[in-house]
Amino acid sequence: MRLAGGYVFSMPSFDVVSEIDMQEVKNAVDQAHREISNRFDFKNTNSTIELDEKGMGITMESASQDRMFALRQVLEEKMVKRGVSMKALDFGDIEDAAGGRARLKVDLKAGIPSDMAKKINVFIKELKMKGVQSSTQGDQLRVNGKKRDHLQEVIAELKAGEFDLPLQFQNFRD
């Protein structure tokens, strides 16, 4: 920001964030739970799907590994329908649970970890756009540029880039 003759000038900027709509996740888990309780192929499998208390993980249990694959597919379908990106879900390995059952833990990824922030910063620098800078601010990034068009190009490139996180772009300011 520069002060000139009493006027405040700021460069155009936007924030890169990775957020999850937890209400949509909760709705998707509830819908998946309802579907497995009504489906014939899940009868007598005691399949469960639960969102943990903190809201940052999902635990699924079923009678066998093949039922677990079907349960995972139901969850994925519900998440996609609710607009939750599959990149926000980190599926663990299927574990053996008590009584010969199978368990699967799913972590929800929100925020941009520092190693991924560095990767995104390097990606933006490699675009070699004049006057475009990025900086890490907590679990998000701020991108500044001299021209609005350059920032829009950065957004398009980030959308096309292969990152393991769902990225959203907020607070676009001229």
Image (cartoon, rainbow, N blue to C red):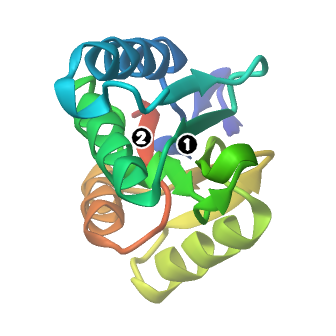
Amino acid type, callout 1: Val
Q: CA distance from mark 1 to mark 2?
A: 6 Å
Image quadrant holding the N terminus, namely top right
Image quadrant holding the C terminus, namely top left
Residue 131, image x and y in percent?
49, 69
Q: Which residue is mark 2?
A: 169
What residue is rendered at 27% in x and 28% in y?
78
Count of labels in the image = 2
Label 1 Cα neighbours within 10 Å, binned few <14 / some 14-19 / many ≥20: many
What residue is rendered at 31% in x and 62% in y?
150
Residue 145, image x and y in percent?
47, 57
Residue in front for this viewpoint, 38 or 171:
38
Amino acid type, callout 2: Phe
Residue 126, image x and y in percent?
47, 88
Left or right, residue 117 beside residue 83: right
Task: Determine the image quadrant of residue 57.
Answer: top right
Residue 5 visible, this angle: yes
What residue is rendered at 40% in x and 18% in y?
33
Q: Earlier in the sequence, mark 1 or mark 2?
A: 1
Query: SS for tag 2?
Result: strand
Residue 140 visible, this angle: no
The answer to whether residue 132 is above or below residue 56 is: below
Query: SS for tag 1?
Result: strand
The answer to whether residue 159 is above or below residue 13 is: below
Label 2 Cα neighbours within 10 Å, binned few <14 / some 14-19 / many ≥20: some
Q: Which residue is mark 1?
A: 17
What residue is rendered at 56% in x and 39% in y?
61
In the rendering, which numbered label is found on residue 107?
none
Residue in front for this viewpoint, 159 or 74:
74
Residue in front for this viewpoint, 168 or 133:
168
1 and 2 marks in contact (CB < 8 Å): yes
